[in-house]
Amino acid sequence: MKRIVSICFREGGKASRYTCEGMDLKPGDLVMANTPGGIDLGTVVTVPMDFDDALVPDDIEPVLRTATDKEIERGQLKKVKEKEAYDLCLELIEKHELDMNLIDAVFTFDGKKVTFFFTSDNRVDFRELVKDLVSSFRARIELRQIGSRDQAKLVGGIGMCGRELCCCTFLNKFAPVTLRTARDQGMSLNPGKLNGACGRLMCCLQFEKDAYADARKRLPKTGKRIRTPDGMGVVSDVNYITEKVTVKFAEEDSFTTSVYDWEGLAPLNHDRDRNDNDNHSNDEDN
């Protein structure tokens, strides 16, 4: 068994899991841990929980230690410097008349590098901007252009489901999402309902893609003739979640509909029925 805790390194940012063997941690505690950008100050956001070794990745990092008063003070100063860096970069962008939208400024904990995240619809020549930033901060400067989904991941927010955005909680990679995915799930092609906070198709459309693909293979298509206990009818609607089909029956001057569980029903085999009718006609002719 391994004791696991989730740590967040930025307000509203994605939480990462770390081992915390022999440490008495609780939500709100400040700790030091390794990140892709080096050692950083993070906040514990979950109660430590025990997991079976088979469920824990081999490369998971341990919490290094509880943050000291000096490290906490340094972390607070880091936030102040990031705000100043953001404001200064905005002024320089306006000065150089660059077509870019600044999203965030992030210092490493040691203060030796600062990364500026921005979005832009066009290629940006920011060489003069970098020169001004280097002279202002005396640190390594990185300007990283990101997409609208990465912007939502950095900024954070609440989705239409009422929960925190998937991209800034647990989603590590962005899978391509197309309108075909929405069509396969029988959703209305309304941008207001399909687009997320980033303005792109919601990532959660991918979560049940395989389940819908499997259901589409087993359930009939709209317009298919099927045999039911009440006679022959045409499928007018399919619910892939409940696996129920709505069948329309034609009458003399109107039509009626009934809903059935797909299990036990079968689509009409047109070729077989046509061959049977042909053979029956041949027998009558003979």
Image (cartoon, rainbow, N blue to C red):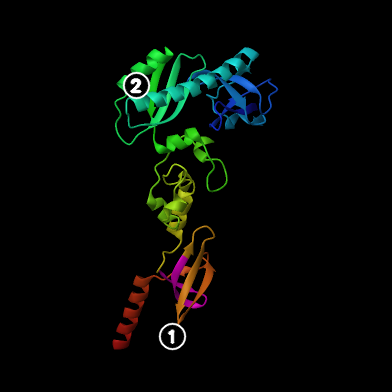
Measuring 42% from the left and 40% from the top, which residue is drawn there?
175
**Crowd class of label 2 (few under 14; some 14 to 19; many from 20; radius 10 Å):** some
Q: Nearer the viewer, residue 6 or 101?
A: 101
| Rendered-image quadrant of the N terminus | top right
Amino acid type at circle 1 is: Asp
* Near-viewer residue (30 or 73): 73
Q: Nearer the viewer, residue 79 or 191?
A: 79
Q: Is the C terminus in the top left, top right, bottom left or bottom right quadrant?
A: bottom left
Q: Which mark is residue 129?
A: 2
> Which of marks 1 and 2 precedes in the sequence?
2
The residue that label 1 is drawn on is: 253
Residue 164 placement (x, y as % from top left) = 56, 40
Q: Amino acid at mark 2?
A: Leu
Q: Position of residue 252 (x, y in %)?
A: 43, 86
Compared to residue 186, the image places residue 137 above or below, namely above
Residue 276 figure quarter: bottom left
Dot 1 lies on which element? Answer: loop
Between the C-alphas of marks 2 and 1, the distance is 75 Å
Q: Which quadrant of the structure image shows residue 5?
A: top right
Which stretch appears magenta? 224-237
Q: Is residue 76 above or below residue 251?
A: above
Quick check: can you spot residue 139? no
Residue 251 versus residue 193 in the image, above or below? below
Q: Residue at x 42, y 12 (%)?
A: 138
Q: Which mark is residue 264?
A: none
